[in-house]
Image: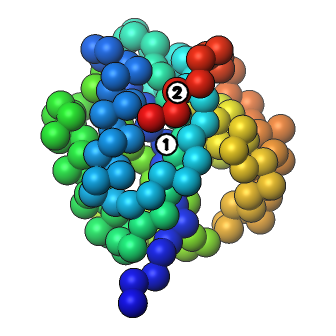
Amino acid sequence: MNMEHNVWLLLGTNLGNKAQNLMAATGAIRTFLGTVINQSHIYETEPWGRSHQPLFYNQVLQIQTPSTALETLHHIKQIEFLLGRDGKEKWAPRTLDIDILFFDALNVESPLLTIPHKHLHERRFTLEPLFELAPELVHPVFNKTIAELRADCIDPLAVSKLDSVYKF
């Protein structure tokens, strides 16, 4: 019997038809990983780490999957590749980026994977959509809620919730 894991993912895109990229990613996540339990609004965000590029669309998904954390990472890399990500340059424009924010309450630090995501608490573009869905979710390392991490975040980059709800 497979155990279902509760996983929080951040999707990001800043090339091509960004809404379409998120829709395709959500469909691929359903196909390769499991059930999408919840989706945030889409947020338009300034790029982090490298400012001279198009604005991003970001969205948080909560999923349930029978896959392990490493299997989930493998599936994510497949999905990114299938949807046009080349992955050659850090912080470069991209058709799709998927980050594992949380995987159950796991705390993993390895050369391949860090869970919770190591920059989650520093990035408003992650905290805003996560706050929308789970303000009381507790970060297992900092032992703070998403609401508390959001209140403490000093990231100055603009994050705007789009009016349209994109439930794919």
Q: Nearer the viewer, residue 157 or 61?
A: 61
Q: Is residue 98 above or below residue 84?
A: below
Q: Point out which mark residue 2 bears.
A: none
| Image coordinates for residue 4, horizontal then vertical, percent | 48, 75
Instruction: Tell me how far mark 2 sits from mark 1, CA to CA.
Output: 14 Å
Residue 98 seen from this side: yes
Residue 103 appears in the figure: no
Few, some or many residues within 10 Å of mark 2 (<14, 14–19, 20+): some
* Residue at the image position 28 percent from the left and 14 percent from the top: 16
Q: Position of residue 90 (x, y in %)?
A: 30, 34
Q: Is residue 112 above or below residue 118?
A: below
Q: Is residue 89 left or right of residue 132?
A: left
Q: Residue at x 18, y 31 (%)?
A: 84
**Element under disc 1:** strand
Q: Given contact means CB atoms under 8 Å apart, are the residues at marks 2 and 1 in contact?
A: no
- Residue count near mark 1 (Cα–Cα under 10 Å), binned few <14, some 14–19, many ≥20: many
- Residue at 35% in and 52% down: 30
Q: Which one is nearer the viewer's eye here, 117 or 128? A: 128
Corner quadrant of residue 53: top left
Q: Nearer the viewer, mark 2 or mark 1?
A: 2
Label 2 element class = loop
Q: Is residue 86 above or below residue 28?
A: above
Q: Report the residue marked by disc 1.
A: 10
**2 or 1: tag closer to the N-terminus:** 1
Quarter of the figure with residue 56: top left
Q: What amino acid is at disc 1? A: Leu
What is the number of the mark on residue 166?
Answer: 2
